[in-house]
Amino acid sequence: CDNEVFKGAVALMQENIEHPLKTSDISRILGVSDRQIQRVFAKNGLDTPCKYYRNIRLEKARQLLEQTQLTYIDVSMACGFGSPSTFSKQFKARFKKPPSRMRSVQPSETL
């Protein structure tokens, strides 16, 4: 999407994963209304800004789980989830498996 509001909103979301912004904060920073941001996302066939943001955070969590040895609590916090249980529920809803199943099995762990 070439829309400047959309690009600005997504950039803010990606820059603020650990401490997520409210949609109202994003709109205030961009100098537009909450409704305008919602319309831009809807016009492009996307989820609401809130769901889109959550998916960005969940994708980051998946990446951290696959590429690091951070604990689930650390991943949860790094991706702005209030509690590990909330993180786990939302992760499972998005990826159809719990975060514990996303870890790559290292050869030394199979012994």
Image (spheres, rainbow, N blue to C red):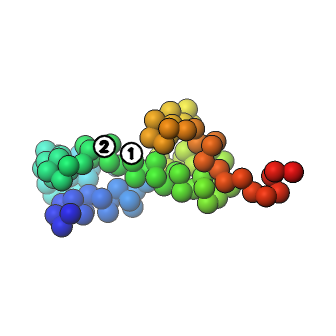
Verify CB contact (< 8 Å) between mark 1 and mark 2. yes
Relative to residue 3, is residue 87 drawn left or right? right
Residue type at mark 1: give it: Arg
**What is the crowding at mark 1: few (fewer than 14 residues within 10 Å), some, or many (at least 20)?**
many
Where is residue 5 shown, x and y percent of the image? Answer: 18, 60
Q: Horizontally, is 13 left or right of 48 in the view?
A: right
Residue 3: image quadrant is bottom left
Q: Position of residue 11 (x, y in %)?
A: 32, 63
Mark 2 closeness class: few <14, some 14–19, many ≥20 residues within 10 Å = some
User: Which image quarter: residue 107?
Assistant: bottom right
Q: Decide: is 36 above or below 94.
A: below
Q: Position of residue 79 (x, y in %)?
A: 49, 50
Q: Is residue 27 visible?
A: yes
Q: For mark 1, give the secondary structure.
A: helix
Single out the residue that lies furthest toward the right: 111
| Residue bearing the label numbered 2 | 50
Amino acid at dot 2: Cys
- Residue marked by disc 1: 54
- Quarter assignment of residue 63: bottom right
